[in-house]
Amino acid sequence: MFRKIALITLAPLTLAGCATTSLFSPYPDQMAAVQSSLDAGTGEQSLGSLASKAESGSDALLYRLERARLSQLLEKFEDSRADFDWAGNAFDQGDMKATVQASSLVSGVTSMITNDNAIGYSGDAYERVFVHAFQAFNYLALKQVDGAEVELRRAADQQRNLAEKNEAEIAKAQKEAEEKKVPLDKVAGHFAGLDEIAGQVRSSFQNAYVLYLSGAVWEARGEWGRAAVDYRQALEMYPENKELQAALTRAEKRQRPKNNGTVVFLYEEGFAPRKDEIKVPIPTFTGEVVTLAFPMYHASSQAAYGGLSVSYSGTTKTAPLLTNVGALAARSLKEKIPGMLVRQTLRAVAKHQIQKQAGSQFGPLGQLAGNVYNFISEGADLRSWLLLPAYTAAMQMELPAGTQSVDLVAPGVSMAQTVEVKARRTTLVRVVNTRSRLFIQTFEL
């Protein structure tokens, strides 16, 4: 009898444990040490810790994204390129899988009786756009400008194509919630905090930073029409951004410095905010009220944007904000709430039935085993790409040709940086601030 009870209660846990590495170890806790290693100068050790996790399992895509970003900051560009390529293929395969499984929001028996952590990580749309932008940096570092251009076109295509797909998925989730009689209106108040953050952006995937990067590359290559298109789209998101206004004017008038060179500063600050867990009471279609765990973003969990200032020969210029990644993430989560509520409600009913069957067939011991299983298997899915920056910004400066020294000032850190400026050419200076350390990468176009 004990063996039967063990099989009932432990088999789902075994399945879930094989399928994921974040079921019983919250993902943000795992990544905290990796984030800290960048400031501590021990990033190489973190690469080693990610090695086995990135090779297999339902979280492999997420660990690949983290490793790709980490490798890039450590200037292991070929390794990063390979991981981002793998991630891009995984996204594509996930699209095909989602098409096949489009008949239901519930994915698999294991996820039905454990929690969303047992569902293979498929990534968010905003993460997918960043993949192409960061891959472009790898190609620029490897002197393969054509490859960078391909990735930037893909990033632009993603932002256009995701709009229709995103609307369809939201509508489908809401419809299924109605069919399953999940009372979205009665639980909406528990997620009201998302509105404050998500309301800062118009969509969960449009990224002005990526568009600015793309526009700068097209501008440097003399593709004025392409540059104008990207700058204009970014300006629609931030109509008061003077840097975008100036960029669009340059592209439309095809303005290039006559004797000086162009230096584009691309800035990435901090780390994307982590999700927290909240408990939400939900009335089910069986008449019961169950308390379930959900992920949540809180405004207090993200520091305010600090910004980057660049000084040259007595003149200081500050990069205006282009992307609030926390807002993108919050809006993405908000859009997923209806689907999550459906899965969680159905899951709660299924668990309750398993618990009742265990109690009726195996008595008090079965009931106890069911209670234990329900307790330890219930947890919010807190996974997201946490090595992404919290904020991004960009600006352009015109500097005299030659070796120039600029002073960089950002929250918690400042430093002098030399830049090789070539007349009528463009140099990209990427500045990544990981809280107390700057990573600088330069790319000539």
Image: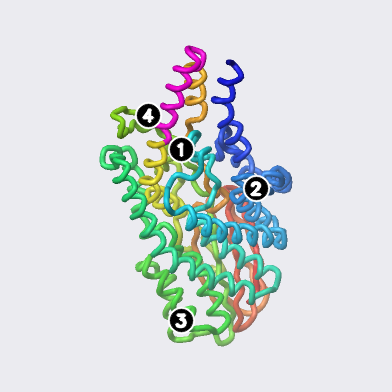
Q: Is residue 120 magenta?
A: no
Q: Tell me the residue at 56%/75% (across/down).
A: 217
Give the distance between the C-alpha atoms of the residues marked 2 and 1, in whole angstroms: 23 Å
Q: Determine crowd level at label 2: few under 14, some 14-19, many 20+ residues with C-alpha closer than 10 A.
A: many
Q: Going from the N terminus, do you reach mark 4 or mark 1 first?
A: 1
Q: Tell me the residue at 29%/40% (across/down).
A: 181
Identify the amino acid type marked 3: Arg
Cβ–Cβ under 8 Å for marks 3 and 4 = no
Q: Going from the N terminus, do you reach mark 3 or mark 2 first?
A: 2
145 sits left or right of 334 in the view: right
Q: Going from the N terminus, do you reach mark 3 or mark 4 first?
A: 3
Q: Going from the N terminus, do you reach mark 1 or mark 3 first?
A: 3
Cβ–Cβ under 8 Å for marks 2 and 4 = no
Residue 390: percent from the left, percent from the top? 50, 52
Residue 429: percent from the left, percent from the top? 60, 67
Which residue position holds label 3? 250
Quarter of the image where one finds residue 252? bottom left
Residue 33 vertical position relative to residue 436 in the rendered view, above or below: above
Does any portion of residue 130 appear in the rendered image?
yes
Which residue position holds label 4? 291
Q: Which mark's residue is nearer the viewer, 4 or 1?
A: 4
| Secondary structure of the residue carrying numbered label 2 | helix
Give the distance between the C-alpha atoms of the residues marked 2 and 4, in whole angstroms: 38 Å
Give the distance between the C-alpha atoms of the residues marked 4 and 1, in whole angstroms: 16 Å
Which residue position holds label 2? 38
Which residue position holds label 1? 276
Q: Which of the two residues, 32 or 373, is positioned nearer the viewer here? A: 373
Q: Which of the two residues, 363 or 380, is positioned nearer the viewer here? A: 363
Part of the protein shown in magenta: 347-366
**Rendering colour mode:** rainbow
Identify the amino acid type marked 4: Thr
Q: Going from the N terminus, do you reach mark 2 or mark 4 first?
A: 2
